Amino acid sequence: MKFLIGTSGFSYEDWKGSFYPESIKKNEMLSFYNGVFQSVEINVTYYTIPPAAAFEKMAMKTGGAFEFIVKVNQETTHRRKENKSAIEALHQAISPLREQQKLGGLLAQFPYSFKNTEPNRKYLLETKEYAKDTPLFVEFRNNRWAHPAVKQFLKENEIGYVNVDEPELTGLMPKQNWLTAENGYIRFHGKNKEKWWDGQGSERYDYKYSMGELEQWLVGISEVLKKSYKSYIFFNNHPKGNAPANAQTLKKLLVEYIKK
């Protein structure tokens, strides 16, 4: 049961002193990160697509077994007007990762307003087509997608599904252990109910999981691992260094659980 665990992003200043050494420089963070984790989500691409040279440098700072999951641009998931050109630009930028076999796939995180409708399902197929042979993983925020027919639809079209842990609020996605493609995917966003809808900046992700909360996921994660070739697990609760701390804890728990 193979899994790669990591965090959503890595270059956070507030990780200094808890995860990173206080004196670490920005350009040293990824190499340090790779000493602990084997995979990372790149989120900057949601806001802007860096040049290929930036990804070339990232690849050089990581070992041969390291994998990157790259979030698609907001044009693809939120604006949805120039999807083809946005993904083509992303393909060009991340070509160094693909060439060095460090590209795990693309992550499309759709907003709550993106509901389960026929036009939106067609849009998913279009996005999958533009992704070409790069694995595509989709994350939904609206619980209208939590339907068996959606699971079958994604399976038939080889679109990966992102299981999420987030606040138990009306309309949000429930806890699941779906597998719709070769590889599994799980993201932990935290359970900050108070700041989820109206928090500023990263406030909605300001949350630290307890040991008990992580243990509650062990059965579900193991079910995904049993059925998948490999699975990606990421923590997006990045404020205050909570993500790397929780990721390391869950990694230990999973290793022990699998041994039993």
Image: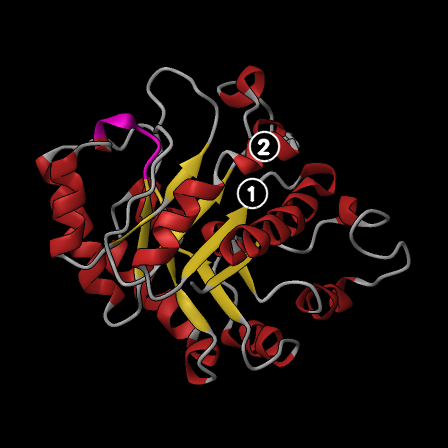
For this rendering, which residue is in front, 245 or 140?
245
Colour option used: secondary structure
Residue lying furthest right: 23
Question: Quarter-wise, where is residue 92 in the image?
Answer: bottom left
Q: Is residue 222 above or below residue 239?
A: below
With 60 as the anchor, is 153 left or right in this view? left
Q: Are marks 1 and 2 in contact (CB under 8 Å)?
A: yes
One can see residue 26 in this view:
yes
Specify few, some or many for label 1: CA neighbours under 10 Å numbering under 14, 14-19, or 20 or more. many
Q: Amino acid at mark 1?
A: Asn
- Is residue 141 on the magenta stretch? yes
State the image coordinates of residue 135 (x, y, percent, origin top left).
30, 65
- Is residue 42 on the magenta stretch? no
Name the residue tied to disc 1: 236
Query: What are the residue bounds of the magenta stretch?
Result: 140-144
For the N terminus, which image quadrant? bottom left
With 155 as the anchor, is 170 left or right in this view? right
With 238 as the anchor, is 218 left or right in this view? left
State the image coordinates of residue 209 (x, y, percent, origin top left).
62, 33
Name the residue tied to disc 2: 205
Q: Secondary structure at mark 1?
A: loop
Q: How many marks?
A: 2
Specify few, some or many for label 2: CA neighbours under 10 Å numbering under 14, 14-19, or 20 or more. many
Q: Is residue 122 above or below residue 143?
A: below
Residue lying furthest left: 118
Residue at 47% over, 84% down? 100
Q: Earlier in the sequence, mark 1 or mark 2?
A: 2
Q: Amino acid at mark 2?
A: Tyr
Residue at 66% over, 76% down? 61
